Amino acid sequence: MAAFSSSTVISILVFSLMHGAFMGLSASNLYQNFDITWGDSRGKMLHNGELLTLSLDKVSGSGFQSKISYLFGKIDMQLKLVPGNSAGTVTAYYLSSQGPMHDEIDFEFLGNLSGEPYIVHTNVYTQGKGEREQQFYLWFDPTADFHTYSMLWNPQTIVFSVDSTPIREFKNMESIGVPFPKNQPMKLYSSLWNADQWATRGGLVKTDWTQAPFTASYRNFNANPWLSQKLDAASEEKLKWIQRKYMIYNYCTDAKRFPQGFPPECQ
């Protein structure tokens, strides 16, 4: 029998446990998969666990987290974002481990005035360091209906997708010294909170509390193990097209932010 180091055995065991947990997940019953963790009664499970809602008012926001942690996989959730004048609000939907050296894979949806497009803010943290922001306008109204937001995470790559359309990829580039999240299991979190000091036009537009409560809705959660999936040629072309048409900020082109040179993954 082949000999494995203790760390290798632990990694194999963790993924085996996560694989078993993945296979037992139910897309229809959010009670089985999540706990509402803050916000008093502002977070709700409805329709026998088929729907989850988070609300924000002037007193507090709300949030939930998954019952288990995941080491790699494809996470899908359908969200319907805060409608109307959502300026100042942020709906965060992300994977994260714990501690000062945590890893994190972020979707954040930045609210806006009625009729203006939502901004999707993405980021990747490795070993406690983020600052890898990319932002996009959505090409549809995310408040009118549910849409699927996905995070694919395996040892080779991280892919952010919207309705199965990739919008961002962060590849494993450890070969050139870029840390990649691959050792820390992460839980799935979501929260709805007030960030009007920065969220809308850099904080120029404040939250209109006469519109409260603000509510975001969630359904059809799925998590599946994916250790080797990556973008095919057609998906890579689609990603490039989305980025050309809808990307509004990319840290890898912000020369003012990196006067000493861009991070190595930007090369």
Image: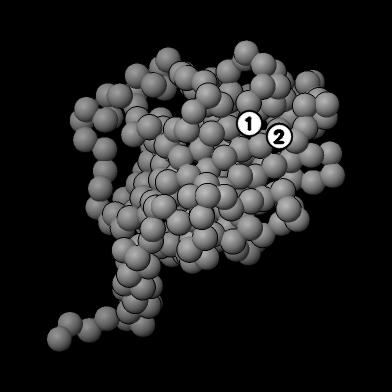
Q: Residue at x 32, y 70 (%)?
A: 20
Left or right, residue 77 beside residue 189: left
Q: Where is residue 22? Give x, y as percent.
A: 35, 62
Q: Residue at x 26, y 30 (%)?
A: 235
Q: Where is residue 28? Give x, y as percent.
A: 41, 52
Would you identify the image quadrant in which residue 207 lies? Answer: top right
Label pair 2/1, CB-CB below 8 angstroms: yes
Q: Amino acid at mark 2?
A: Phe
User: Can you say which quadrant of the picture contains the N terminus?
Assistant: bottom left
Q: Residue at x 37, y 67 (%)?
A: 21
Residue, disc 2: 214
Whether residue 108 is visible to the viewer of this picture, yes or no, is yes
Left or right, residue 66 beside residue 7: right
- Rounded to the nearest angstrom, the CA distance separating label 2 from label 1 is 6 Å
Q: Where is residue 134? Give x, y as percent.
A: 52, 31
Q: Amino acid at mark 1?
A: Val
- Residue nearest the viewer, comparing 110 with 32: 32
SS label for mark 1: loop
Residue, disc 1: 82
Neighbour tally class for label 1: few under 14, some 14-19, many 20 plus, Cα within 10 Å: many
- Residue nearest the viewer, comparing 129 with 9: 9
Whether residue 252 is visible to the viewer of this picture, yes or no, is no
Left or right, residue 257 beside residue 8: right
